[in-house]
Image: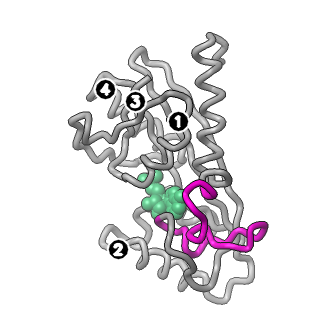
Amino acid sequence: MRAVLASKNAKKLRELQDILGKQGVEVILQAEAGVDIEVEETGETFEENAILKAEAVRDQTGMIAISDDSGLVVDALGGAPGVYSARYGGEGLDDTERFKLLLRNMEGQNDRSCRFVSVICCALPNGDRILARGECQGVLLNEARGEGGFGYDPVFYLPDLGKAMAELTPEEKNQISHRGNALRVFQKELENYLNGTHQ
Ligand code: IMP
């Protein structure tokens, strides 16, 4: 099965391909399918945005399209940055400036619990869709650690592993991450769909 990823993020592609590749699913970036759209993420939930992205790319390509809408949910900030994680602080910031802003906004907060959330949507040419959600619980660090991953990984601490997400290898990250968890749910849902037992 060949699917197009509704994203320009090559790091997301690698995380998806590492897991879905084992199931015989080949995923390509939307640019490789000749698509150059930036879907407006107007939804208020990860689910709504995942559907918007996958269906827009499915409609442009006629192919099976897969999207991931993800973000960091910080309890002390009422769930922010949440669906606005990629745009936190405005479009002009890079990943490092964004997590530094987050740490500044968290100064003085004792409750540093947070979680990454990922919702995968697979939009099929016949109009069907498969949705899967995964989460990963953590604690916000006071300063960055590690060089791996992307986004908020350097400030996301995993107490059970004693490491920041950015200190994990790609394989270790996939085993415990929100995206890895969502993809494992997605694999099961896809199997059910292909067996005709999809709800
Ligand atoms: P999206 O492309 O709209 O789904 O934006 C997701 C944003 O959430 C990214 O730009 C990152 O800032 C953040 N994010 C999502 N997944 C991860 C991850 O695995 N590690 C670190 N940050 C992430």
Outermost residue to the bottom = 108
Q: Quadrant of residue 98?
A: bottom left
Q: Residue at x 36, y 34 (%)?
A: 4
**Label 4 to label 3: alpha-carbon separation:** 13 Å
Q: Nearer the viewer, mark 4 or mark 3?
A: 3
Ligand 1 neighbours mark 1 (CB distance < 8 Å): no
Q: Is residue 135 visible?
A: yes
Find residue 54 and report its horizontal and vertical position in percent: 41, 35
Say what amino acid the circle numbered 1 marks.
Leu
Against 87, residue 164 (above or below) is: below
Please give the residue where the numbered disc 3 appears in the rendered image. 3
Amino acid bearing label 3 = Ala
* Highlighted magenta segment, given as a residue range: 150-173
Name the residue carrying label 2: 93
Marks 1/2: CA distance?
A: 31 Å
Residue density around tag 2, few if under 14, some if 14–19, many if 20 or more, within 10 Å: some
Residue 84 visible from this viewpoint: no
Instruction: Give percent across and percent down for residue 5.
Output: 39, 39
Q: Is mark 4 within 8 Å of ligand 1?
A: no
Label 4 packing within 10 angstroms: few (<14), some (14-19), many (20+): some
Q: Which mark is residue 20?
A: 1
Mark 3 to mark 2 CA distance (whole Å): 31 Å
Q: Tell me if the residue at label 3 has its CB under 8 Å from ligand 1.
A: no
Q: How crowded is the residue under tag 3: few (<14 C-alpha within 10 Å), some, or many (20+)? A: many
Q: Nearer the viewer, mark 3 or mark 2?
A: 3
Answer whether residue 160 is magenta in the image: yes
Three-letter residue code for mark 4: Asp
Give the number of the disc on residue 195: none
| Residue carrying label 4 | 59
Secondary structure beneath label 4: helix
- Look at the image and tell me in which quarter the N terminus lies: top left
